[in-house]
Amino acid sequence: MEPATVPGSGTGKLIAGRYEIIRLLGRGATAKVYLAADLHTGGSVAVKSISKHSCASPSSIVREVAIMRRLRHPHIVRLLEVVASRSRIHFVLELAAGGELFHRLESQGRFPEDLARRYFQQLISAVGFCHARGVFHRDLKLENLLLDEKGDLKVTDFGLSAQADQIRNDGLFHTLCGTPAYVAPDILSKKGYDADKVDIWSCGVILFLLIAGYLPFNDPNLMAMYKKIYRGEFRCPSWTSPELRNLIERILDPNPKTRISLAGIINHPWFKKGLDEEKWTAKMRFRDEELVKEEAGRVLNAFDIISFSSGCDLSGLFDVAPDRERFVSGEPAESVVNRVEEVGRIEGLRIRRGKKKALLEWQNGNLVARVEVHRLTDDLSVVEVVKGEGPKERRLWRERIGPALKVPAF
Ligand code: ADP
């Protein structure tokens, strides 16, 4: 379990003037993930940081952001904010303080059925929630299951997920994706597949793994492993109860047409045991209502605009010249400039300003910061800043100007 983060106890490195990096939590294929203190709330967050060079195209990031922002569920890691700096994109995420489920399984060898059931119910709750909204994960695996401080499950990594609108005319997905041991036979057949069936298969692999402590389909030779997957060749360990054995066999059915559906899983006697149906229903609804309330009074967020504006290419937002930074503000241009001016006045700086620009200098004429605001909508702007180079300028930026500009756009 992560200890509470104490602002000032970390590296001193700040992201967006708000998140103080404490230490590295983990490394992924493309990302470094840090534990950080949120100086505004005093809480802890995870910051997933990706180099712009190594990351996928802006459009795929925008897609990931748009998808994650819509998913609010107790068992899905929530995306809180996205900040782009000169060379990196930082995803500020809800912290899963309990670490990886993988590590817990590794230390215990395997889980008793009751504990495996609890994790599996939480996984199915998250997956069902996403599927009902046309979002499929497509890379469900143990490594993507984290735990919060109470030991409850949090599904993460929607980097590969796809929305229903990417389905081709025949109603099937056609991209080959996933991690070999978790890949459904329908993907291997390359004829196209139903993404919900593929996620269900991966949930079956995870369930087997939790109970057995090893993967159902495994072979050092990839082709031999695929063959086993294709034929649905696996054996439940001897300690599996008959009810659970039945459920696993219904999920790991190589024929997607006869494979059990999510509704079937939820109604299965092994799954239902100990399930609080009222709580279950509340989990499936709760965050939606919150989201609707939150979005009702607000214009679209910049990332929503980027992801939905097919006619206008705003992906340049991610290509920032080396000496400047850009971020999105939820305020009209003029009030952003007003805030900058106010800080300048308090700090006794020389100020030159226009309606959408402000230049802050020391009395000797040295640059402190140049801020330029581009309008996106009436209430949404892109703020572009050039910062002075020296330590004094940096401190001023970090402690005064940065925080003054950090507006609740995202
Ligand atoms: P990638 O998508 O590049 O593979 P991941 O999202 O898997 O990166 O993150 C790498 C590691 O960072 C994870 O295995 C986990 O240990 C840690 N991590 C990721 N997200 C969080 C989070 N929200 N809270 C805590 N730790 C996290």
Image: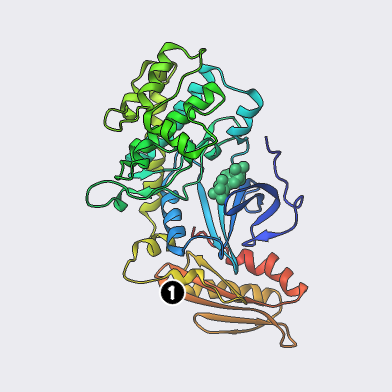
Residue 172: x %, y % from top left:
28, 46
Judge left or right: residue 47 versus residue 176: right
Q: Nearer the viewer, residue 213 or 105?
A: 213
- Badge 1: few (under 14), some or many (20 or more) residues near its Cα, within 10 Å? some
Q: How is the image coloured?
A: rainbow
Quarter of the image where one finds residue 201: top left
* Dot 1 amino acid type: Arg
Q: Quadrant of the N terminus?
A: top right
Residue 372: x %, y % from top left:
54, 78
Q: Which of 170 and 403 is in front in this view?
A: 170
In the image, ligand 1 is in what quadrant? top right
Residue drawn at x 37%, y 26% is 251
Residue 338: x %, y % from top left:
55, 74
Residue 230: x %, y % from top left:
38, 33
Above/below status of 382 relative to 233? below
Q: Mark 1 points at which residue?
A: 375
Residue drawn at x 57%, y 63% is 406
Quarter of the image where one finds residue 203: top left
Residue 125 visible somewhere in the drawing: no
Q: Nearer the viewer, residue 84 or 225?
A: 225
Above/below status of 122 relative to 191? above
Judge left or right: residue 114 versus residue 309: right
